[in-house]
């Protein structure tokens, strides 16, 4: 047996340009997370998608342990994100969006998602994250966010952070949220009161770190022959991390190093292709496999 995971987040179309080219593909925070976590356990996916891409998303998940009962299908088109990635600074140098059906969504978790032992709040407006959190009874809660929400309503984002067990943020995000310079100091400040218990700091090509009150450990990124598209890497990292926790039914600090190692492997798979193709292949190849911890 293993713990179930409920994820609430976005399902999008991504029009992405990188130094390696340009492609339009399926994506979204819930999608990258679910593909990574489904390597280890059953994932209950919650979000909204347009009827223009719903069959394509279902086909992507076919054969994986991903339950789409919580997927709302709208007659409006799927959200479309346009982005240009800068590989020198590892940031999105420009972006725009076509919201489509996203503004319609109001989370309504079914019983299976409410009762899942693990919950991941994908990067979305903190009011939606709060709606999901208030419906769930998970014993292990992970959350992500973005600088745009921290600048708009830092109090709401902080409320989600202090209601979560593990935060998944990059250097800039944790420094902005904590109001401190230096990712290590900022993460330690967030953990000082005991909630969140850990901050996973996503550092792109430098790997990732896990910060807790009494320890900090870092893991280098695996070697990737060709980094093609960094979209979704952070969500894949969170999926691998929480997926391994769910598989072994562990949420103790001693296990987090193994979980982080799994997370960075999933992130590496995600960046190897445009869209989800690399991660989906990794998920299909590894689903149900024995894991060394």
Image (cartoon, grey):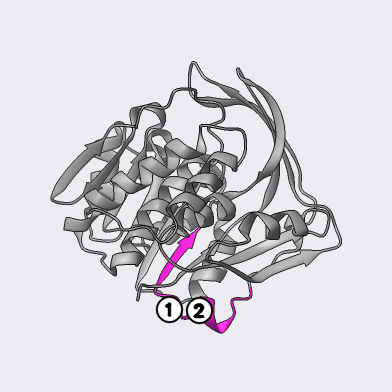
**Could you tell me which secondary element the residue under label 1 belongs to?**
loop
How crowded is the residue under tag 1: few (<14 C-alpha within 10 Å), some, or many (20+)? Answer: some
In screen coordinates, is 165 left or right of 137? left
Is 201 in front, or is 238?
238
How crowded is the residue under tag 2: few (<14 C-alpha within 10 Å), some, or many (20+)? Answer: many
Is mark 2 in CB contact (under 8 Å) with mark 1? Answer: yes
Q: Which residue is mark 1?
A: 137
Is 180 in front, or is 37?
37
In screen coordinates, is 289 left or right of 144? left
Residue that extends furthest to the left in the rendered view of this protein: 214
Residue 114 highlighted magenta (yes or no): yes
Find residue 114 and name its label: 2
Residue that extends furthest to the bottom in the rendered view of this protein: 111
Is 232 in front, or is 247?
247
Residue 253 highlighted magenta (yes or no): no
170 up-or-down from 65: above or below? above
Tell me if I can see residue 122 in this picture: no
Q: Residue at x 43, y 72 (%)?
A: 4
Which image quadrant: the C terminus?
Answer: bottom left
Percent x, y for residue 251?
26, 64
Q: Residue at x 31, y 62 (%)?
A: 245
Percent x, y for residue 262?
33, 48
- Residue 203 appears in which quarter of the rendering? top left
- Residue 161 appears in which quarter of the rendering? bottom left
The magenta span reads 108-121
Residue that extends furthest to the right in the rendered view of this protein: 75
Tell me if I can see residue 3 in this picture: yes
**Mark positioned earlier in the residue sequence (2 or 1):** 2
> Separation of disc 2 and disc 1 at Cα?
6 Å
Q: Residue at x 52, y 63 (%)?
A: 7
**Could you tell me which secondary element the residue under label 2 belongs to?**
helix
């Amino acid at each position: 047996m293993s713990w179930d995971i409920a994820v609430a987040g976005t399902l999008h179309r991504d029009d992405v340009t990188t130094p390696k080219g340009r492609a339009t593909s399926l994506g979204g925070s819930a999608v990258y997370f679910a593909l990574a976590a489904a390597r280890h356990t059953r994932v209950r996916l919650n979000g909204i998608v347009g009827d223009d891409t719903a069959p394509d998303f279902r086909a992507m998940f076919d054969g994986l342990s991903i339950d789409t009962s919580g997927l709302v299908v709208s007659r409006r088109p799927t959200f479309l994100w346009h982005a240009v990635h800068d590989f020198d600074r590892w940031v999105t140098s420009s972006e725009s969006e076509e919201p489509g059906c996203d503004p319609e969504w109001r989370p309504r978790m079914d019983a299976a998602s409410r009762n899942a032992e693990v919950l991941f709040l994908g990067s979305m407006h903190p009011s939606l994250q709060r709606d999901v959190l208030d419906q769930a009874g998970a014993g292990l809660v992970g959350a992500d966010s973005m600088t745009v929400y921290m600048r708009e309503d830092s109090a709401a984002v902080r409320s989600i952070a202090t209601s979560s067990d593990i935060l998944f943020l990059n250097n800039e995000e944790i420094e902005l949220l904590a109001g401190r310079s230096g990712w290590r100091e900022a993460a330690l400040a967030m953990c000082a009161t005991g909630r969140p218990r850990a901050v996973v700091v996503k550092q792109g090509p430098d790997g990732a770190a896990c910060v807790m009150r009494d320890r900090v450990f870092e893991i280098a990124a695996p070697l990737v022959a060709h980094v093609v598209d960094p979209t979704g890497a952070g969500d894949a990292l969170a999926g691998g991390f929480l997926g391994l926790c769910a598989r072994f039914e562990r949420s103790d600090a001693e296990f987090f190093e193994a979980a982080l190692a799994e997370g960075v492997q999933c992130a590496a798979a995600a960046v190897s292709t445009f869209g989800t193709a690399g991660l989906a292949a990794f998920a299909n190849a590894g689903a149900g496999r024995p894991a060394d911890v």
